Amino acid sequence: MKFILFIAALLIIFLLAYIVSNNKKGIKLKPIIIMLILQIAFAFLFLNTEIGLTVIKGISSLFTHLLTYAAEGINFVFGGIANEETSPFFLNVLLPIVFISVLIGIAQYFKILPFIIHYLGLLLSKVNGLGKLESFNAVASAVFGQSEVFISVKKQLPHLPEHRLYTLCTSAMSTVSASILGAYMTMIEPKFVITALILNLFGGFIIVNIINPYEVKPDEDIIEVQEEEKQSFFEMLGEYILDGFKVAIIVGAMLIGFVALISMINHIFDAIFGISFQTVLGYVFAPFAFIAGVPASDVIKAGTIMSTKLLSNEFVAMMDLAQISDTLSKRTVGIISVFLVSFANFSSIGIIAGAVKGLNEKKGNQVAKFGMKLLYGATLVSLLAAAITGIMI
Protein backbone atom coordinates (compact mmCIF):
# COMPACT_ATOMS: atom_id res chain seq x y z
CA MET A 1 0.00 0.00 0.00
CA LYS A 2 2.73 2.46 0.92
CA PHE A 3 4.40 2.01 -2.48
CA ILE A 4 1.12 2.78 -4.25
CA LEU A 5 0.79 5.90 -2.10
CA PHE A 6 4.37 6.85 -2.95
CA ILE A 7 3.70 6.63 -6.70
CA ALA A 8 0.52 8.69 -6.19
CA ALA A 9 2.51 11.23 -4.15
CA LEU A 10 5.13 11.56 -6.90
CA LEU A 11 2.46 12.07 -9.55
CA ILE A 12 0.65 14.70 -7.46
CA ILE A 13 3.82 16.57 -6.47
CA PHE A 14 5.16 16.59 -10.02
CA LEU A 15 1.76 17.62 -11.37
CA LEU A 16 1.56 20.52 -8.90
CA ALA A 17 5.03 21.62 -10.02
CA TYR A 18 4.18 21.14 -13.72
CA ILE A 19 1.05 23.31 -13.45
CA VAL A 20 3.11 26.40 -12.54
CA SER A 21 6.08 25.59 -14.81
CA ASN A 22 7.28 28.58 -16.83
CA ASN A 23 8.71 26.36 -19.58
CA LYS A 24 6.85 23.06 -19.81
CA LYS A 25 8.54 22.07 -23.06
CA GLY A 26 11.98 22.66 -21.55
CA ILE A 27 11.63 20.13 -18.70
CA LYS A 28 14.50 17.62 -18.76
CA LEU A 29 13.55 14.17 -17.49
CA LYS A 30 17.04 12.66 -17.21
CA PRO A 31 18.36 14.81 -14.33
CA ILE A 32 15.02 14.52 -12.54
CA ILE A 33 15.14 10.71 -12.67
CA ILE A 34 18.82 10.61 -11.63
CA MET A 35 18.24 12.86 -8.62
CA LEU A 36 15.09 10.99 -7.58
CA ILE A 37 17.09 7.75 -7.60
CA LEU A 38 19.80 9.46 -5.53
CA GLN A 39 17.19 10.66 -3.04
CA ILE A 40 15.77 7.16 -2.63
CA ALA A 41 19.26 5.67 -2.30
CA PHE A 42 20.34 8.16 0.39
CA ALA A 43 17.04 7.77 2.27
CA PHE A 44 17.50 3.99 2.28
CA LEU A 45 21.13 4.37 3.38
CA PHE A 46 20.38 6.65 6.33
CA LEU A 47 17.14 5.07 7.49
CA ASN A 48 17.52 1.35 6.77
CA THR A 49 21.18 0.29 6.77
CA GLU A 50 23.88 -0.29 9.37
CA ILE A 51 26.25 1.99 7.45
CA GLY A 52 23.71 4.79 7.52
CA LEU A 53 23.02 4.18 11.20
CA THR A 54 26.76 4.40 11.92
CA VAL A 55 27.03 7.67 10.01
CA ILE A 56 24.01 9.11 11.83
CA LYS A 57 25.39 8.01 15.20
CA GLY A 58 28.72 9.61 14.37
CA ILE A 59 27.16 12.92 13.36
CA SER A 60 24.79 12.83 16.32
CA SER A 61 27.67 12.12 18.69
CA LEU A 62 29.62 15.02 17.21
CA PHE A 63 26.76 17.44 17.78
CA THR A 64 26.16 16.02 21.26
CA HIS A 65 29.74 16.87 22.15
CA LEU A 66 29.47 20.31 20.53
CA LEU A 67 26.32 21.05 22.52
CA THR A 68 28.10 19.93 25.69
CA TYR A 69 30.95 22.34 24.99
CA ALA A 70 28.45 25.08 24.19
CA ALA A 71 26.74 24.41 27.53
CA GLU A 72 29.99 25.24 29.33
CA GLY A 73 29.92 28.78 27.96
CA ILE A 74 26.16 29.15 28.47
CA ASN A 75 26.35 27.98 32.09
CA PHE A 76 29.22 30.37 32.79
CA VAL A 77 27.10 33.34 31.67
CA PHE A 78 23.59 32.22 32.58
CA GLY A 79 24.19 29.65 35.33
CA GLY A 80 21.70 30.06 38.17
CA ILE A 81 19.00 31.72 36.04
CA ALA A 82 17.24 28.44 35.29
CA ASN A 83 15.60 26.50 38.07
CA GLU A 84 17.10 23.12 38.82
CA GLU A 85 15.86 20.31 36.55
CA THR A 86 14.31 22.80 34.11
CA SER A 87 15.26 23.05 30.46
CA PRO A 88 14.75 26.59 29.09
CA PHE A 89 14.37 26.53 25.30
CA PHE A 90 16.44 29.67 24.73
CA LEU A 91 19.40 28.45 26.79
CA ASN A 92 19.47 24.81 25.71
CA VAL A 93 18.31 25.01 22.09
CA LEU A 94 19.04 28.48 20.72
CA LEU A 95 22.22 29.69 22.43
CA PRO A 96 24.36 26.72 21.27
CA ILE A 97 23.94 28.25 17.80
CA VAL A 98 26.59 30.79 18.88
CA PHE A 99 29.26 28.13 19.36
CA ILE A 100 28.42 26.24 16.17
CA SER A 101 28.55 29.55 14.29
CA VAL A 102 32.09 30.02 15.60
CA LEU A 103 33.13 26.60 14.26
CA ILE A 104 31.70 27.49 10.85
CA GLY A 105 33.69 30.72 10.94
CA ILE A 106 36.90 28.84 11.71
CA ALA A 107 36.29 26.40 8.85
CA GLN A 108 35.59 29.36 6.56
CA TYR A 109 38.70 31.25 7.72
CA PHE A 110 41.01 28.32 6.98
CA LYS A 111 39.40 27.80 3.53
CA ILE A 112 37.99 24.38 4.42
CA LEU A 113 34.38 25.25 3.69
CA PRO A 114 35.02 27.13 0.43
CA PHE A 115 36.96 24.10 -0.86
CA ILE A 116 34.15 21.67 0.03
CA ILE A 117 31.40 23.92 -1.29
CA HIS A 118 33.20 24.66 -4.56
CA TYR A 119 34.04 21.09 -5.53
CA LEU A 120 30.85 19.52 -4.22
CA GLY A 121 28.96 22.15 -6.22
CA LEU A 122 30.94 21.25 -9.36
CA LEU A 123 30.17 17.56 -8.82
CA LEU A 124 26.44 18.22 -8.40
CA SER A 125 26.34 20.33 -11.56
CA LYS A 126 27.24 17.19 -13.55
CA VAL A 127 23.97 15.49 -12.64
CA ASN A 128 21.36 18.13 -11.80
CA GLY A 129 20.89 19.71 -15.23
CA LEU A 130 21.58 23.18 -13.82
CA GLY A 131 24.54 25.55 -13.80
CA LYS A 132 27.65 25.47 -11.64
CA LEU A 133 26.57 28.63 -9.83
CA GLU A 134 23.21 27.09 -8.91
CA SER A 135 24.95 23.94 -7.64
CA PHE A 136 27.47 25.93 -5.63
CA ASN A 137 24.70 28.04 -4.14
CA ALA A 138 22.67 24.97 -3.07
CA VAL A 139 25.61 23.54 -1.12
CA ALA A 140 26.49 26.94 0.33
CA SER A 141 22.87 27.42 1.44
CA ALA A 142 23.07 24.25 3.51
CA VAL A 143 26.12 25.69 5.29
CA PHE A 144 25.49 29.42 5.63
CA GLY A 145 21.69 29.70 5.66
CA GLN A 146 19.07 31.41 3.57
CA SER A 147 20.16 35.00 4.06
CA GLU A 148 23.93 34.77 4.50
CA VAL A 149 24.44 32.62 1.39
CA PHE A 150 23.72 35.52 -0.97
CA ILE A 151 26.76 37.39 0.32
CA SER A 152 28.93 34.68 -1.24
CA VAL A 153 27.46 35.35 -4.71
CA LYS A 154 26.81 39.07 -4.50
CA LYS A 155 29.09 39.84 -7.46
CA GLN A 156 26.83 37.75 -9.69
CA LEU A 157 23.51 39.15 -8.43
CA PRO A 158 23.33 42.22 -10.71
CA HIS A 159 23.85 40.00 -13.78
CA LEU A 160 21.49 37.14 -12.92
CA PRO A 161 18.26 36.84 -14.94
CA GLU A 162 15.09 36.25 -12.94
CA HIS A 163 14.87 32.52 -13.68
CA ARG A 164 18.34 31.83 -12.29
CA LEU A 165 17.64 34.01 -9.27
CA TYR A 166 14.52 31.92 -8.58
CA THR A 167 16.65 28.75 -8.50
CA LEU A 168 19.11 30.28 -6.05
CA CYS A 169 16.28 31.40 -3.77
CA THR A 170 14.55 28.00 -3.92
CA SER A 171 17.74 26.30 -2.73
CA ALA A 172 18.05 28.82 0.09
CA MET A 173 14.47 28.22 1.27
CA SER A 174 14.52 24.42 0.81
CA THR A 175 17.60 23.75 2.93
CA VAL A 176 18.63 24.74 6.46
CA SER A 177 21.83 26.24 7.81
CA ALA A 178 24.49 24.12 9.50
CA SER A 179 24.54 26.44 12.52
CA ILE A 180 21.07 25.31 13.65
CA LEU A 181 21.40 21.58 12.98
CA GLY A 182 22.32 21.05 16.62
CA ALA A 183 19.18 22.91 17.70
CA TYR A 184 17.02 20.66 15.53
CA MET A 185 18.70 17.55 16.94
CA THR A 186 17.58 18.50 20.44
CA MET A 187 13.96 18.51 19.22
CA ILE A 188 13.69 15.63 16.72
CA GLU A 189 15.71 12.50 16.02
CA PRO A 190 19.11 13.26 14.39
CA LYS A 191 18.58 10.65 11.68
CA PHE A 192 15.60 12.59 10.36
CA VAL A 193 17.53 15.88 10.43
CA ILE A 194 20.41 14.47 8.37
CA THR A 195 18.09 12.60 5.99
CA ALA A 196 16.05 15.75 5.36
CA LEU A 197 19.19 17.80 4.73
CA ILE A 198 20.30 15.45 1.94
CA LEU A 199 16.84 14.88 0.46
CA ASN A 200 16.09 18.60 0.31
CA LEU A 201 19.36 19.33 -1.48
CA PHE A 202 18.41 17.02 -4.36
CA GLY A 203 14.70 17.74 -4.05
CA GLY A 204 15.31 21.41 -4.67
CA PHE A 205 17.02 20.57 -7.97
CA ILE A 206 14.15 18.25 -8.97
CA ILE A 207 11.36 20.76 -8.34
CA VAL A 208 13.29 23.61 -9.97
CA ASN A 209 13.87 21.45 -13.04
CA ILE A 210 10.08 21.19 -13.39
CA ILE A 211 8.92 24.65 -12.30
CA ASN A 212 11.82 26.60 -13.74
CA PRO A 213 13.76 24.66 -16.44
CA TYR A 214 16.39 26.48 -18.50
CA GLU A 215 19.75 26.12 -20.19
CA VAL A 216 22.86 27.92 -18.98
CA LYS A 217 25.39 28.93 -21.61
CA PRO A 218 29.03 28.09 -20.80
CA ASP A 219 30.07 31.75 -20.86
CA GLU A 220 27.32 32.56 -18.30
CA ASP A 221 28.22 29.73 -15.95
CA ILE A 222 31.13 31.21 -14.03
CA ILE A 223 31.63 30.86 -10.31
CA GLU A 224 33.33 33.90 -8.82
CA VAL A 225 32.77 33.52 -5.13
CA GLN A 226 32.79 36.75 -3.20
CA GLU A 227 35.89 36.83 -1.02
CA GLU A 228 35.45 38.23 2.46
CA GLU A 229 37.68 41.07 3.54
CA LYS A 230 40.83 39.73 5.12
CA GLN A 231 40.43 39.69 8.88
CA SER A 232 42.62 38.57 11.69
CA PHE A 233 41.66 35.29 13.29
CA PHE A 234 40.25 36.99 16.38
CA GLU A 235 38.32 39.55 14.36
CA MET A 236 36.70 36.63 12.54
CA LEU A 237 35.86 34.92 15.85
CA GLY A 238 34.21 38.08 17.15
CA GLU A 239 32.16 38.47 13.98
CA TYR A 240 30.88 34.89 13.94
CA ILE A 241 30.14 34.93 17.68
CA LEU A 242 27.96 38.02 17.19
CA ASP A 243 26.37 36.55 14.06
CA GLY A 244 25.45 33.38 15.94
CA PHE A 245 24.00 35.39 18.81
CA LYS A 246 21.95 37.50 16.39
CA VAL A 247 20.51 34.34 14.83
CA ALA A 248 19.59 32.99 18.29
CA ILE A 249 17.94 36.28 19.28
CA ILE A 250 16.06 36.57 15.97
CA VAL A 251 14.76 32.99 16.16
CA GLY A 252 13.78 33.56 19.79
CA ALA A 253 11.94 36.77 18.95
CA MET A 254 10.10 35.11 16.06
CA LEU A 255 9.07 32.24 18.33
CA ILE A 256 7.65 34.64 20.91
CA GLY A 257 5.68 36.48 18.24
CA PHE A 258 4.43 33.44 16.32
CA VAL A 259 3.54 31.31 19.35
CA ALA A 260 1.65 34.22 20.91
CA LEU A 261 -0.12 35.05 17.64
CA ILE A 262 -1.17 31.44 17.00
CA SER A 263 -2.40 31.18 20.59
CA MET A 264 -4.53 34.29 20.14
CA ILE A 265 -5.97 33.15 16.79
CA ASN A 266 -6.72 29.69 18.20
CA HIS A 267 -8.51 31.26 21.15
CA ILE A 268 -10.62 33.48 18.87
CA PHE A 269 -11.53 30.60 16.57
CA ASP A 270 -12.38 28.37 19.51
CA ALA A 271 -14.61 31.04 21.02
CA ILE A 272 -16.46 31.68 17.73
CA PHE A 273 -16.47 28.30 15.96
CA GLY A 274 -15.65 25.84 18.74
CA ILE A 275 -12.52 24.64 16.89
CA SER A 276 -8.94 25.95 16.77
CA PHE A 277 -7.50 27.64 13.71
CA GLN A 278 -4.68 25.08 13.59
CA THR A 279 -7.18 22.23 13.52
CA VAL A 280 -8.97 23.87 10.59
CA LEU A 281 -5.66 24.03 8.73
CA GLY A 282 -5.02 20.44 9.75
CA TYR A 283 -7.99 19.37 7.65
CA VAL A 284 -6.62 21.37 4.70
CA PHE A 285 -3.21 19.70 4.89
CA ALA A 286 -4.51 16.25 5.82
CA PRO A 287 -4.60 14.99 2.20
CA PHE A 288 -0.95 15.97 1.73
CA ALA A 289 -0.01 14.19 4.96
CA PHE A 290 -1.88 11.11 3.69
CA ILE A 291 -0.10 10.93 0.32
CA ALA A 292 3.22 11.36 2.12
CA GLY A 293 2.47 8.09 3.91
CA VAL A 294 0.99 9.23 7.23
CA PRO A 295 -1.53 6.67 8.56
CA ALA A 296 -5.16 7.77 8.20
CA SER A 297 -5.63 7.93 11.97
CA ASP A 298 -2.89 10.59 12.26
CA VAL A 299 -3.51 12.76 9.18
CA ILE A 300 -5.38 15.59 10.95
CA LYS A 301 -2.74 15.97 13.65
CA ALA A 302 0.04 15.66 11.08
CA GLY A 303 -1.65 18.18 8.79
CA THR A 304 -1.90 20.60 11.70
CA ILE A 305 1.86 20.37 12.32
CA MET A 306 2.60 20.83 8.61
CA SER A 307 0.39 23.92 8.38
CA THR A 308 1.92 25.36 11.56
CA LYS A 309 5.37 25.12 9.96
CA LEU A 310 4.18 26.85 6.80
CA LEU A 311 2.48 29.71 8.66
CA SER A 312 5.08 30.26 11.36
CA ASN A 313 8.38 28.37 11.22
CA GLU A 314 9.92 24.96 11.77
CA PHE A 315 10.80 25.60 15.43
CA VAL A 316 7.18 26.29 16.41
CA ALA A 317 6.08 23.17 14.51
CA MET A 318 8.80 21.02 16.10
CA MET A 319 7.71 22.13 19.56
CA ASP A 320 4.10 21.24 18.73
CA LEU A 321 5.22 17.86 17.36
CA ALA A 322 7.15 17.14 20.56
CA GLN A 323 4.00 17.79 22.61
CA ILE A 324 1.86 15.25 20.71
CA SER A 325 4.49 12.76 19.48
CA ASP A 326 3.38 10.18 22.08
CA THR A 327 -0.07 10.12 20.45
CA LEU A 328 1.34 9.53 16.94
CA SER A 329 2.82 6.44 15.30
CA LYS A 330 6.59 6.29 14.85
CA ARG A 331 5.99 6.35 11.10
CA THR A 332 4.06 9.61 11.35
CA VAL A 333 6.69 11.21 13.56
CA GLY A 334 9.44 10.29 11.08
CA ILE A 335 7.58 11.56 8.01
CA ILE A 336 6.58 14.85 9.63
CA SER A 337 10.04 15.35 11.17
CA VAL A 338 11.62 15.24 7.71
CA PHE A 339 8.95 17.60 6.35
CA LEU A 340 9.76 20.17 9.04
CA VAL A 341 13.50 20.43 8.35
CA SER A 342 13.54 23.34 5.91
CA PHE A 343 13.00 27.09 5.83
CA ALA A 344 9.84 26.81 3.70
CA ASN A 345 7.45 29.21 5.45
CA PHE A 346 5.87 32.61 4.85
CA SER A 347 8.39 34.55 6.94
CA SER A 348 11.24 33.21 4.80
CA ILE A 349 9.90 35.13 1.81
CA GLY A 350 10.63 38.37 3.64
CA ILE A 351 13.96 37.12 4.97
CA ILE A 352 15.27 36.11 1.54
CA ALA A 353 13.86 39.16 -0.27
CA GLY A 354 15.37 41.39 2.41
CA ALA A 355 18.77 39.69 2.21
CA VAL A 356 18.92 40.07 -1.58
CA LYS A 357 17.58 43.63 -1.45
CA GLY A 358 20.33 44.56 0.99
CA LEU A 359 22.85 43.57 -1.69
CA ASN A 360 20.93 44.67 -4.80
CA GLU A 361 17.63 46.52 -4.52
CA LYS A 362 16.40 45.65 -8.02
CA LYS A 363 16.98 41.91 -7.52
CA GLY A 364 15.41 42.06 -4.08
CA ASN A 365 12.23 43.46 -5.63
CA GLN A 366 12.25 40.60 -8.14
CA VAL A 367 12.44 38.08 -5.30
CA ALA A 368 9.51 39.75 -3.55
CA LYS A 369 7.52 39.53 -6.79
CA PHE A 370 7.90 35.75 -7.12
CA GLY A 371 7.84 35.16 -3.35
CA MET A 372 4.65 33.06 -3.29
CA LYS A 373 5.85 30.88 -6.16
CA LEU A 374 9.12 30.46 -4.27
CA LEU A 375 7.29 29.24 -1.16
CA TYR A 376 5.12 26.98 -3.32
CA GLY A 377 8.18 25.28 -4.84
CA ALA A 378 10.04 24.94 -1.53
CA THR A 379 6.96 23.38 0.10
CA LEU A 380 6.81 20.79 -2.71
CA VAL A 381 10.47 20.00 -1.96
CA SER A 382 9.57 19.29 1.69
CA LEU A 383 6.58 17.20 0.64
CA LEU A 384 8.75 15.16 -1.74
CA ALA A 385 11.27 14.49 1.04
CA ALA A 386 8.45 13.43 3.37
CA ALA A 387 6.98 11.07 0.75
CA ILE A 388 10.35 9.38 0.17
CA THR A 389 10.76 8.97 3.92
CA GLY A 390 7.31 7.39 3.98
CA ILE A 391 8.42 4.39 1.92
CA MET A 392 11.51 3.82 4.06
CA ILE A 393 9.98 3.56 7.53
Image: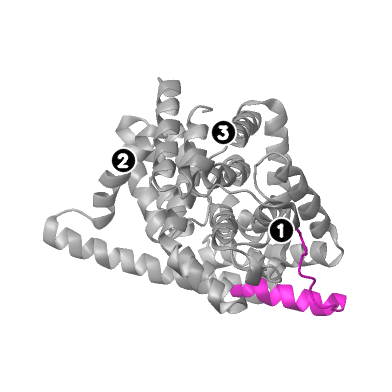
Q: Quadrant of the N terminus?
A: top left
Residue 154 magenta-highlighted: no
Q: Is residue 279 above or below residue 1?
A: below
| Nearest to the observer: residue 67 or residue 38 | 38
63 versus 365 height, above or below = above
Range covered by the magenta-colored residues: 222-246
Q: Are marks 3 and 1 in contact (CB under 8 Å)?
A: no
* Dot label at residue 220: 1
Give SS at disc 3.
Answer: helix
Q: Quadrant of residue 101?
A: bottom right
Label 2 vs label 1, nearer the camera: 1
In the picture, residue 194 is in which quadrant? top right
Residue extending farthest top: 1
If you read the primary sequence from the N terminus, does the residue marked by circle 3 or circle 1 appear first? 3
Earlier along the polypeptide chain: callout 2 or callout 1? 1
Within 10 Å of disc 3 (Cα), the crowding (few <14, some 14-19, many 20+) is few
Label 3: which residue? 29
- Does any portion of residue 296 appear in the rendered image? yes
- Alpha carbon separation for disc pair 2 and 1: 43 Å
Q: Residue at x 51, y 28 (%)?
A: 393
Q: Which residue is mark 2?
A: 286
- Looking at the image, residue 310 sits to the left or right of residue 360; the answer is left
Relative to 53, residue 122 above or below: below
Residue 136 position within the rendered picture, expressed as x and y whole percent measured from the top left: 71, 54
On screen, 263 above or below 26?
below
At a point 34% along the width and 44% down the height, the residue shown is 303
Looking at numbered disc 1 in the image, what kind of residue is underneath it? Glu
The label on residue 353 is: none
Of pointers 3 and 2, the one earlier in the residue sequence: 3
Q: Is residue 347 left or right of residue 281?
A: right
Question: Quick one: label 1, few (<14), some, or many (20+) residues within 10 Å?
Answer: few
